[in-house]
Image: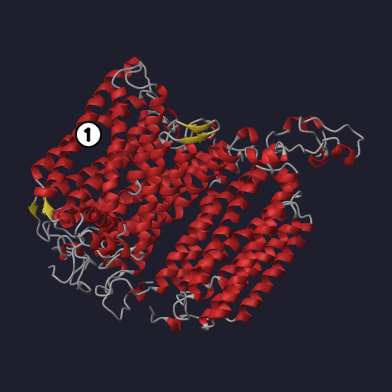
């Protein structure tokens, strides 16, 4: 790094700091990237603590209720959005302003697709009474959350496997459907809830927290990408000064990177 | 040294929203209100690192005073057993806020945000930091965070609507209490989160600045040691703060949404919270103290007119402390319910972290040897640092030994220990730095006699105050307790009186400095005969600090008998 | 606002990026397939290894690290490894319960 510091064709004390420092700006962005990685790293750490020490089996079982198709689909969406992002950078490096904007717009569209899929994924979970317990708005719309009360005692007493235990529907009061009742019958008669144990509740808690925080970063990314689009259109990002786009690209790749780990950890744990 | 072509830092035109300022300035030619507004804008929109320092400094002094007032209330309440002035609930909030304010709003921003901001670029021979606008934004985060903390005093969203309960439970916000109680915890945690951003952005700025903004001929090992200290601290700020960020965010999410990641009833592990919290908070104490150590290196060299002994060792030891400091956090948790294996591991590593610190102490003392020592105020503060921080360090050894810790954990002994290190270390270094660089920052010199008196009162009061705590701590006086057994009363009374002597000392030297601001003798460019670059700038420094690249004719410690060029 | 360092800026071709993307897709497929095979405790490890390979591709090519200066490359590697080790140390407690 220090070799760069010596190369100044101008007096730093005359023109002030108008002179951009390409490598310095990139380095600063990488330092910020570190903070994002460690922020999510902390949650992954919590996940692995629970997974390894207490709830391996329960995480395994809870994970099987997540929609692999949607999760996998979103993985492809994000990976492709990373591709369009770097295409955007390559294009502007070649001076192709409108081509670059095209790729950035595609990146934004992929990001929005990701959020739409997430919306349906979460919506599906909400409809099945799986949502963070204290959100009164959701409680009003969907009924009491299944993540509110753990059923560890009943699970131990039942002697069933966890999969079987989860599969027995209960009603809002916690009473199990009578044995022998068909699934459709039970559903009609109000036995629409499931019973989860503590480990499964933690799994879903981490799921919503981590994918939620990630989704928030995707949305932030969309906003920042729109800003980059505007700058490119106004020729503030050009072939010999595109560090802003490159740095936003770095941010976007971090968002992609986090999903690369989120996907197997939640969707493939079973 | 200054010329008329460049403006001093009292007139800055490195502004964001420059158009707004210009309009206000124009309007202000005939109208004092607009003139005042223009003046305010010239400060709160300034990206000049020297002005950002002042912005931080003014508010941190205010916050320190509030925090100290809370400390004073605690000491008043402790003068006799039983309830004197405040109920137990209020007491719990008072010590919580004392901790939150002192730690997050004073010591952690501390030297980096003030003296670091002002002098890092100058010591490197640079016109400013790498990202001046980010620097100003750091300050905005700081002010917003402080505002949220202030709001948390009496405004929160509880389950029954708006809440009026100041946060309690201690600055460490341990679960399960912090996720289940009625007080305005979420607001306080959001404040801490925002303050964390301030710290992170400052860290990013300083790491980049040291890498990119050095004078062309200044290599890594020609930098002053203060810069090394700021650099190591900046890395801790960047790498450690996100961990507490996510931890506090998880608590907020648990309170707001019921996602029970730390709630044992829902399957969570409260000890996990403690691990995550301390993975940041232990490196955080090095954020508090390492910059101070850098300052002490500078001051001791200047006031003995000797080259610092073992430059490379001191530079590297800052990193040694930073690195090892990441691996010792669970010594705060020996009684929390960890396994013995964990406890032994962390205890062992904790003893290791004393080694790089000892290197510094040895080297400082060696620097004094055969030096031409002047006991001007900066030097007495610096020597106090060495003494007080050493006591802090030694008392830490007892805490690092598991068997002994079991006896003193959560007693006033711990409180004494961390005040010796954070206040006697970090705080005293800050006072030293203010006295050292006051003439350069403000162009005035202060009265030495008053400064020495202030120091003396502080030093005596400090030692009796926190020494008394350690004594009754070992005798069993718990921390965070509103009331106590009668046989502790004598020591509490002595400690409280000593605390007020200490506060009086601080008042004396503060007033001395404030008077000097307006009435002090004009300072020369280099009153202490230092060899680092700030003594070659104008007093106070001009905008962009230098007129052209400074000629590095000699190294930062080029005194007689120099070992480092 | 130009800077004189253009010549060092290395432009990565569309072709190179596309190849990396295809690699990422294949690895994603691989990780889904591997999850279907019951390897017991190894499943998580395999998934994490594949994720790290994918992540390394993103970091090296999309984030341009392969073409950066050795100084920056070292810092990135050190920081990631360092925090990983710090978090692992917590398992000295959790792993011995």
- Camera-nearest residue between B503 and A104: A104
Residue at image location 21% in from the left, 67% down from the top:
B555
Task: Indicate the position of residue B226 as horizontal and vertical percent values.
Answer: 27, 57
Q: Is residue B241 left or right of residue B106?
A: right
Task: Indicate the position of residue B532 as horizontal and vertical percent values.
Answer: 20, 63
Residue at image location 69% in from the left, 73% down from the top:
C22
Q: Is residue C83 above or below residue C69?
A: above
Furthest-left residue in this view: B521
Residue at image location 40% in from the left, 60% down from the top:
B204
Using a 10 Å C-alpha cutoff, classify the residue at mark 1 as few (fewer than 14 neighbours), some (14 to 19) or many (20 or more): many
Would you say residue B273 is visible in this rendering?
A: yes
| Element assignment for label 1 | helix
Task: Indicate the position of residue B198 as horizontal and vertical percent values.
Answer: 39, 52
Q: Is residue B318 left or right of residue B447?
A: right
Query: Toward which corner of the image does residue B504 lie, by quadrant?
Result: top left
The N terminus of chain A - image quarter: bottom left
> Where does label 1 land, which residue?
B503
Q: Is residue B96 above or below residue A249?
A: above
């Amino acid at each position: 790094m220090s070799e760069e510091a010596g190369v100044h064709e101008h007096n730093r004390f005359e023109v002030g700091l108008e002179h951009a420092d390409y490598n310095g700006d990139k380095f600063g962005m990488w330092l910020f990237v570190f903070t994002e990685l460690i922020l999510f790293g902390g949650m992954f750490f919590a996940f692995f603590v629970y997974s390894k020490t207490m709830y391996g089996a329960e995480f395994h079982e809870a994970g099987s209720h997540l929609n692999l198709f949607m999760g996998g689909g979103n993985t492809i969406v994000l990976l492709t959005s990373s591709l369009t992002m770097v295409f955007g950078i390559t294009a502007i490096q070649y001076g192709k302003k409108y081509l670059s904007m095209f790729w950035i717009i595609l990146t934004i569209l992929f990001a929005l697709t990701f959020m739409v899929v997430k919306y349906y994924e979460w919506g599906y979970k909400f409809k099945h009474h799986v949502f963070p317990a204290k959100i009164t708005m959701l409680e009003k719309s969907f009924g009491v959350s299944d993540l509110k009360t753990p059923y560890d005692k009943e699970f131990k007493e039942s002697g069933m496997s966890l999969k079987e235990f989860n599969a027995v529907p209960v009603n809002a009061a916690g009473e199990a459907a009578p044995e022998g009742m068909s699934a459709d019958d039970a559903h009609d008669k109000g036995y629409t809830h499931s019973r989860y144990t503590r480990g499964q509740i933690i799994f879903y808690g981490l799921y919503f927290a981590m994918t939620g925080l990630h989704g928030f970063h995707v949305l932030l990314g969309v906003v920042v990408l729109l800003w980059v689009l505007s700058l490119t259109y106004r020729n503030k990002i050009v072939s010999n000064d595109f560090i802003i786009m490159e740095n936003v690209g770095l941010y976007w790749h971090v968002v992609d990177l986090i999903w690369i780990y989120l996907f197997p950890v939640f969707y493939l744990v079973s | 040294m200054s010329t008329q072509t460049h403006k001093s830092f009292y007139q800055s035109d490195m502004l964001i929203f420059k158009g707004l300022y210009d309009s206000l300035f124009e309007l202000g030619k005939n109208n004092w209100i607009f003139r005042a507004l223009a003046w305010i804008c010239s400060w709160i929109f300034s990206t000049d690192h020297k002005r950002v320092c002042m912005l931080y400094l003014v508010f941190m002094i205010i916050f320190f005073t509030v925090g100290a007032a809370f400390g004073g209330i605690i000491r008043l309440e402790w003068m006799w057993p039983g309830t004197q002035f405040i109920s137990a609930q209020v007491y719990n909030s008072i010590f919580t806020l004392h901790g939150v304010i002192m730690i997050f709003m004073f010591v952690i921003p501390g030297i980096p945000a003030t003296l670091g901001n002002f002098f890092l670029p100058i010591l490197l021979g640079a016109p400013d930091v790498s990202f001046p606008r980010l620097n100003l934004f750091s300050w905005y985060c700081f002010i917003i965070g402080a505002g949220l903390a202030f709001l948390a005093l009496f405004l929160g969203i509880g389950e029954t609507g708006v809440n009026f309960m100041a946060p309690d439970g201690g600055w460490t916000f341990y679960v399960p209490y912090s996720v289940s109680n009625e007080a305005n915890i979420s607001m306080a945690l959001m404040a801490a989160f925002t303050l964390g951003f301030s710290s992170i952005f400052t860290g990013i700025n300083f790491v980049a600045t040291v890498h990119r903004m050095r004078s062309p001929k200044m290599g890594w090992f020609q930098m002053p040691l203060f810069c090394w200290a700021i650099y190591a601290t900046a890395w801790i700020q960047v790498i450690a703060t996100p961990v507490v960020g996510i931890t506090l965010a998880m608590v907020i999410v648990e309170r707001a949404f019921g996602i029970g990641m730390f709630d044992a009833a829902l399957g969570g592990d409260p000890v996990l919270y403690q691990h995550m919290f301390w993975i940041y908070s232990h490196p955080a104490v090095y954020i508090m103290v390492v910059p101070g150590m850098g300052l002490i290196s500078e001051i001791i060299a200047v006031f003995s007119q000797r080259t610092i002994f073992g430059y490379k060792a001191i530079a590297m030891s800052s990193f040694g402390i930073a690195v090892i400091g990441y691996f010792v956090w669970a010594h705060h948790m020996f009684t929390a319910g960890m396994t013995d294996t964990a406890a032994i591991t962390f205890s062992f590593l904790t003893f290791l972290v004393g080694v790089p610190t000892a290197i510094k102490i040895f080297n400082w003392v060696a620097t004094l040897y055969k030096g031409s020592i002047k006991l001007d105020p900066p030097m007495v503060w610096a020597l106090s640092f060495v003494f007080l921080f050493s006591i802090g360090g030694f008392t830490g050894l007892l805490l690092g030994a598991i068997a002994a810790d079991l006896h003193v954990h959560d007693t006033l002994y711990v409180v004494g220990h961390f005040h010796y290190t954070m206040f006697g270390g970090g705080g005293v270094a800050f006072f030293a730095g203010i006295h050292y660089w006051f003439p350069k920052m403000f162009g005035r010199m202060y009265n030495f006699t008053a400064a020495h008196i202030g120091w003396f009162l502080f030093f005596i009061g400090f030692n009796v105050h926190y020494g008394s705590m350690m004594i009754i701590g070992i005798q069993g006086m718990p921390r965070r307790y509103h009331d106590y057994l009668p046989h502790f009363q004598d020591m509490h009374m002595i400690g409280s009186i000593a605390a007020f002597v200490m506060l009086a000392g601080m008042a004396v030297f503060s007033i001395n400095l404030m008077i000097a601001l307006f009435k002090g003798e004009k300072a020369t460019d280099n009153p202490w005969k230092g060899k680092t670059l700030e003594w070659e700038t104008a007093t106070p420094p001009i905008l962009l600090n230098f007129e052209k690249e400074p000629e590095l004719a000699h190294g930062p410690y080029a005194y007689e008998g120099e070992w480092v060029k | 606002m130009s800077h004189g360092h253009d010549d060092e800026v290395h432009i990565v071709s569309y072709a190179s990026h596309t190849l990396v993307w295809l690699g990422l897709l294949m690895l994603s497929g691989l990780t889904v397939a591997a999850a279907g095979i019951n390897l017991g405790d190894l499943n998580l490890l395999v998934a994490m290894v594949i994720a790290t390979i994918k992540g390394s591709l993103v970091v090296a090519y999309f984030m341009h690290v392969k073409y950066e200066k050795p100084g920056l490359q070292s810092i990135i590697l050190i920081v990631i490894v360092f925090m990983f080790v710090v978090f692992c140390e917590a398992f000295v407690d959790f792993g011995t319960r």
